[in-house]
Image (cartoon, rainbow, N blue to C red):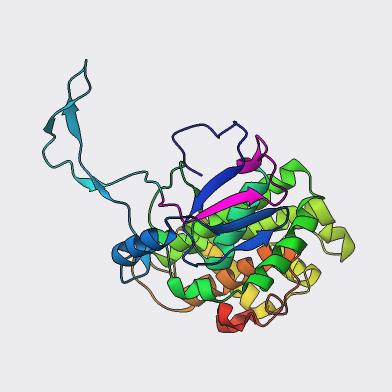
């Protein structure tokens, strides 16, 4: 998670996050999340600023010459206006402990990170602490924030924390990075870029499945072969399986990673064919795997991922 400053280490009772486009509070394990006092005002900002493609883009910035002593601006550098490399979100919600205690010094890199990164997967967005930084555009589709009701979220986080608490720090870090890369994949416009980050995710899920659960020994499959890996993950997690689609995904991966080809053409050729569907299938597989491996039991997670059905079937 890009940031200009080191993680906050001071103990506080409340932290602030964004962007959740829902006037909803819910419990997440030992924590409660609820809209901040400026929620209505900040929602108006997002409604105004989010593009019609449902992405919020970095603000435009200009480079200035400054006085070396006072650091006051002197004049603009010509032709220097551009989208900001890093920008901060507008906070919408607060996080507190349900018992009223202080947040621990490692909250933002441990349980707080898990809460936010899981929200990224659930709502296909990017949540962030109010004073941390983000690079690139953020997916903010208001429709996505209506799929899950408060009871669904609270059961989901109860199950997730019961699994999270059993994991070693290294496993937790791989899981967080997996969620982070899933969120990053959505920010890219070219299909081959999205596919690349999604494949990073499926490799991370394999690492967790093998290291934490010994998948290759449990189901008698060798770890070699990318198709074997993905099929083993789906089998172990009791998810929908389709070996033909898995083979196609792996074939697309091999052409892209080893030959730089996307549909036997240049990756930026704009091709819209089987490779696009391979990316979409992989998106659904990764999303289901992330939720299932952290303990989510919903029938939606185990449903047929071939139809790109979306979150509205959760209930």
Residue 268 magenta: no
Q: Quadrant of the image for the C terminus?
A: bottom right
Q: As rendered, which of 276 and 12 lies closer to the eye?
A: 12
Q: Is residue 79 left or right of residue 212?
A: left
Residue 291, located in which quarter of the rendered image? bottom right
Q: What residue is drawn where x is 83% and y is 60%?
A: 216
Q: Position of residue 227 (x, y in %)?
A: 68, 67
Residue 228 in view in this figure: no
Q: Main secondary structure of the magenta part?
A: loop
When the figure is inspected, residue 99 is found, relative to residue 301, above or below; the finding is: above
Residue 191, located in which quarter of the rendered image? bottom left
Count of residue discs:
0
Residue 103 magenta: yes
Q: What residue is drawn where x is 59% and y is 31%?
A: 10
Q: As rendered, which of 253 and 60 lies closer to the eye?
A: 60
Q: As rendered, which of 257 and 174 lies closer to the eye?
A: 174
Q: Is residue 56 left or right of residue 165?
A: left
Residue 271, located in which quarter of the rendered image? bottom left
Q: What residue is drawn where x is 74% and y is 54%?
A: 208
Range covered by the magenta-colored residues: 89-109
Residue 166 in view in this figure: yes
Q: As rendered, which of 280 and 224 lies closer to the eye?
A: 280
Q: Position of residue 105 (x, y in %)?
A: 65, 34
When the figure is inspected, residue 54 is found, relative to residue 115, above or below; the finding is: below
Q: Position of residue 179 (x, y in %)?
A: 60, 56
Q: Residue furthest top?
A: 69
Q: Position of residue 138 (x, y in %)?
A: 41, 58
Q: What residue is drawn where x is 77% and y is 67%?
A: 232
């Amino acid at each position: 998670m890009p940031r200009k400053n080191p993680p906050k280490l001071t103990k506080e009772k409340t932290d602030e996050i964004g962007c959740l486009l829902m006037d909803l509070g819910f419990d997440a394990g030992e924590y409660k999340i609820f809209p901040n006092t400026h929620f209505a005002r900040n929602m108006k900002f997002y409604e105004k600023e989010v593009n019609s493609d449902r992405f919020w883009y970095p603000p435009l910035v200009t480079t200035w010459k400054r006085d070396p002593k006072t650091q006051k601006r002197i004049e603009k550098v010509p032709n220097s206006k551009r989208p900001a490399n890093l920008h901060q979100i507008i906070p919408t919600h607060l996080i507190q402990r349900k018992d009223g205690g202080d947040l621990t010094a490692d909250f933002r890199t441990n349980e707080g990170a898990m809460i936010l990164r899981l929200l990224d997967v659930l709502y296909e967005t990017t949540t962030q602490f109010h004073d941390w930084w983000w690079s690139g555009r953020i997916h903010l589709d208001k429709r996505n924030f209506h799929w899950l009701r408060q009871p669904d979220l609270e059961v989901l986080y109860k199950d997730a924390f019961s699994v999270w608490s059993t994991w070693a720090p290294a496993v937790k870090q791989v899981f967080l990075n997996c969620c982070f890369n899933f969120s990053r994949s959505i920010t890219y416009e070219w299909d081959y870029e999205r596919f690349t980050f999604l494949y990073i995710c499926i490799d991370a899920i394999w690492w967790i499945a093998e290291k934490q659960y010994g998948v290759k020994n449990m189901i008698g499959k060798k770890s070699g072969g990318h198709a074997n890996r993905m099929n083993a993950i789906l089998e172990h997690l009791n998810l929908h399986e389709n070996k033909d689609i898995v083979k196609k995904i792996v074939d697309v991966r091999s052409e892209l990673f080893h030959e730089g080809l996307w549909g036997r053409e240049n990756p930026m050729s704009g091709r819209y064919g089987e490779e696009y569907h391979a990316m979409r299938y992989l998106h659904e597989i990764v999303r289901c795997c992330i939720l299932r491996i952290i303990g989510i039991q919903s029938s939606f997670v185990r449903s047929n991922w071939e139809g790109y059905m979306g979150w509205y079937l959760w209930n």
